[in-house]
Image (tube, rainbow, N blue to C red):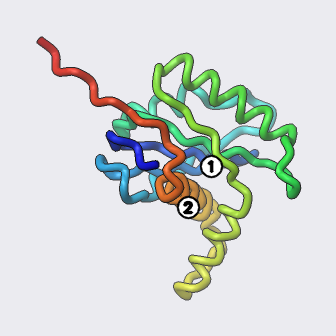
């Protein structure tokens, strides 16, 4: 079932070295790459930077990729994603939806190759494109919760 109110959504493709981002248009119909956040190994998850990006992109909701294993079971990284998603929801007050992200990077790599491009030296671009694939799938499958528009200030 399609949500009754669409909104601008930010997608997060979680990785150990890079976090790919994508954003939808205000109607929640088209997803576009929105950059990457470089991670430092061994450091805490960049929750504050994700919050800054969501604010800058005017996101009203977040779709976070959930890296499950081949059988669809949780992995150590998926547990980290669940913790970050809960923290983002708590700190931003935005709805956060988790979605299976298996094969999004493969789909992004395939898309680049089909267009005759090279992925050499473009890992950040691929991660952002993977987030775009994730967000487009979520919008197509209507897995996004409804976001009610904020009431106008008196």
Q: Position of residue 8 (x, y in %)?
A: 36, 43
Residue at left offset 69%, top offset 50% = 100
Confirm or deny contact between disc 2 and disc 1 (CB under 8 A).
Answer: no
Asked if one can make out residue 7 in the rendered structure from this viewpoint, the answer is no
Task: From the image, tell me which residue sits under label 2.
Answer: 133
Q: Position of residue 9 (x, y in %)?
A: 43, 43
Q: Is residue 31 above or below residue 57?
A: below
Q: Element under label 1? A: strand
Kindly identify the residue that appears in the image at 11 percent across and 11 percent down: 154
Residue 97, picture quadrant:
top right
Q: Earlier in the sequence, mark 2 or mark 1?
A: 1
In the figure, is residue 29 to the left or right of 35? left
Residue at 78 percent of width and 39 percent of height: 78
Q: Which residue is mark 1?
A: 13
At mark 2, the secondary structure is helix
Instruction: Indicate whether 90 appears above or below 71.
Output: above
């Amino acid at each position: 079932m399609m949500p009754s109110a669409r909104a601008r959504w930010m997608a997060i493709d979680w990785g150990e070295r890079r976090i790919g981002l994508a954003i939808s248009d205000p109607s929640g119909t088209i997803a576009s790459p929105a950059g990457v956040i470089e991670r430092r190994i061994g450091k805490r998850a960049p929750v504050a930077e994700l919050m800054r990006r969501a604010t800058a992109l005017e996101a009203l909701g977040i779709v976070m990729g959930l890296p499950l294993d081949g059988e669809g079971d949780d992995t150590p990284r998926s547990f980290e994603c669940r913790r970050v998603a809960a923290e983002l929801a708590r700190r931003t007050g935005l709805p956060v939806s988790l979605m299976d992200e298996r094969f999004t990077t493969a789909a992004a790599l395939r898309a680049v190759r089909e267009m005759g491009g090279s992925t050499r030296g473009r890992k950040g671009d691929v991660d952002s494109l993977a987030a775009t694939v994730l967000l487009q799938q979520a919008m197509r499958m209507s897995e996004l919760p409804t976001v009610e528009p904020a009431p106008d200030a008196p």
